[in-house]
Image (cartoon, rainbow, N blue to C red):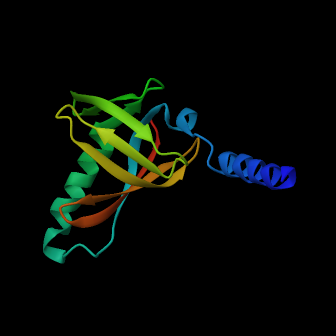
Amino acid sequence: MATKYGLLFFVFVLLQSCGADKTSLLARTWKISELKYSREVPEAMRASIQTEIDRLKSGYTITYNADKTYQALMDGTATSGKWSLNFNSSKITSTGPDGKAVEYRILELSDARFSFEAIEGGEKVIFVMVPAQ
């Protein structure tokens, strides 16, 4: 019986270490490095989409604070809210000023890169973020 509980404890500790909280990796200011679409952008829309991507790259940053709040800046206009990571840091939930919570799947989170998958206009988009300087 003691062996069974010892094994369960070992598995629990192992699972906890694999899903370590990555709050400290996320808590910084990020900017967009690139956007990847799940489908090819139609030729007629490429120029306008690229213009919008370039605007986001140059004018958007988001700061995730350790107190689980965030502030996003787009061309000098600020938006704030709250954020949280799930138990194994594979998803982030962002709650905006309107109180609406949106969940995103994290693809990568390291000191140098934060990428996540979002649904924008019915399309899957991958945001690749890097630390802002």
Residue plotted at (48% across, 26% down): 66
Where residue 119 sits: x, y (%)?
A: 27, 60
The extreme right residue here reads 3
Above or below, 82 against 43 in this view is: above
Q: Is residue 124 above or below residue 84?
A: below
* Location of residue 39 (image quadrant): bottom left
Q: Is residue 57 left or right of residue 79?
A: right
**In the figure, residue 93 lies in which quadrant?**
top left
**Residue in front for this viewpoint, 30 or 109:** 109
Residue shown at the point (35%, 30%) measured from the top left: 70
Observer-nearest of 44 and 112 = 112
- Percent across and percent down for residue 50 are 24, 59
- The answer to whether residue 44 is left or right of residue 63 is left
12 on left or right of 83: right
Judged from this view, the residue extending furthest toward the top is 67
Left or right: 73 as drawn, with respect to 26: left
In this view, the residue farthest toward the front is 1
Does the image show residue 118? Answer: yes
Q: How far across and down, in percent of the image, does residue 8 sit?
A: 74, 53
Q: Position of residue 58 (x, y in %)?
A: 31, 41
Is the N terminus in the top left, top right, bottom left or bottom right quadrant?
A: bottom right
> In the image shown, does 87 or 103 lie closer to the viewer?
87
- Taking the spot 21% from the left edge, 41% from the top edge, the residue there is 100
Q: In terms of depth relative to the viewer, which is nearer, 83 or 57?
A: 83
Query: Do we see residue 133 in this rendering?
Result: no
